[in-house]
Image (cartoon, helix red, strand yellow):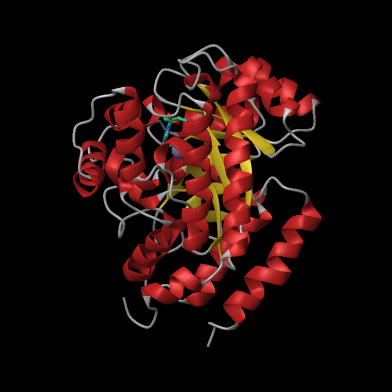
Amino acid sequence: MVGIGYEEIVQAPKALLHDHLDGGLRPATIIELAEAIGHPLPATDPAELGRWFVDAANSGSLERYLETFAHTVAVMQTVDGLRRVARECALDLAADGVVYAEVRFAPEQHLEQGLTLDEVVDAVQAGFVEGTAQAAEAGRFIRIGTLLTAMRHAARSQEIAELAVRHRDRGVVGFDIAGAEAGFPPTRHLDAFEYLQRENFHFTIHAGEAFGLPSIWQAIQWCGADRLGHGVRIVDDITPGERPVLGRLAAYVRDKRIPLELCPSSNVQTGAAPSIAEHPIGLLRDLRFRATVNTDNRLMSGTSMSREMALLVEAFDYGWAELQWFTINAMKSAFIPFDERLAIINDVIKPGYAKLLP
Ligand SMILES: O=c1[nH]cnc2c1ncn2[C@@H]1O[C@H](CO)[C@@H](O)[C@H]1O
Ligand SMILES: [Zn+2]
């Protein structure tokens, strides 16, 4: 990395649209919570457990990558567990210089000990409020919005969509579907997406990660997704060359400024991209798609927003102008109201980068 230091990237304001709550636990917290409930773990030393998650997630397959979540979801079944994980998430993101984050999780996966869906959402919200306040006391501003995810192999999307709308004035800003993509097209959940549109609510869809263009096409043209979770396979509709040629779907995505929630490290782990240097984010940024940089699962990728940006600086020789561009793209694409997005851009992001830009 030339010119830009890692510490400076940490200090720079960053916006994060795609981060899973159950993919970002501190290893030490997993160990403590697992011990209390007698859940067996593959390692009981925090550093070792952290390495285990990254190794196990380095599988080249999304399905195997997702198996690692059994250990995080297991310790997120009580009000105290959920609240603690959410509080620590807010603190960790703030310490990494993230000023705006949308954090997602699937409430239906946290009912094993008898909590209701509403109790799960309330517990996470309480944790975010606590963590945000503690960060502010330490002089770090962060705003967090929650996305509620429905699992695409299950059949609870309508219920989760209604849950999201019920909590829209208490921290929840959007909806998502996640889980294994192949075999579970977004149109399975069309009722939920049509309901959300009638409610004037926002949603993103995991599409174009482990499965290609048909999934992206359905997510946008059948389901009406505001953003694409990953969406990285849109490059399959671009013919490379000196002057790359966009197919109709890629052109539509770019013309409509549909945000791509790109997650470089996660894609390398699941085999959606061969390496960071060969990640399509370079091409998509050159072609001025509405590209954003995201962490996906900080624990499973052993990463952070600052690390993802540092990897891109190294691979593509990006400078502050590019990092600011990704950050403003993300903030423009956030699900909070327009005036609040604008305020964060003008009062936090631009002044932050003004200090760093040459
Ligand atoms: O990159 C991903 N693609 C698809 N599903 C994912 C990804 N990362 C996490 N999850 C799934 O989303 C659930 C709720 O947060 C997680 O439990 C995991 O199963
Ligand atoms: Zn994801």
Q: Nearer the viewer, residue 289 or 168?
A: 168
Would residue 230 be seen by someone viewing this image from the given angle? Answer: no
* Number of marks present in the image shown: 0
Q: In the displayed structure, would residue 10 be above or below residue 125?
A: below
Residue 124: image location, x then y, percent: 57, 35
- Ligand 2 shown in quarter: top left
Q: In the displayed structure, would residue 344 be above or below residue 188?
A: below
Q: In the displayed structure, would residue 156 be above or below residue 93?
A: above
Residue 103, quarter of the rendered image: top right
Q: Is residue 243 left or right of residue 118?
A: left
Residue 253: image location, x then y, percent: 60, 45
On-image quarter of the N terminus: bottom left
Residue 170, quarter of the rendered image: top right
> Farthest residue in the bottom direction?
358
Residue 130: image location, x then y, percent: 60, 47
Q: Is residue 207 left or right of residue 45?
A: right
Residue at 64% from the left image edge and 57% from the top image edge? 331
Q: Is residue 223 left or right of residue 80?
A: right
Residue at 43% from the left image edge and 56% from the top image edge? 281
Q: Nearer the viewer, residue 305 or 208?
A: 305
Q: In the displayed structure, would residue 51 be above or below residue 11?
A: above
Residue at 20% from the left image edge and 40% from the top image edge? 52
Would residue 354 be seen by someone viewing this image from the given angle? Answer: yes
Residue 182: image location, x then y, percent: 39, 23
Residue at 37% from the left image edge and 61% from the top image edge? 307
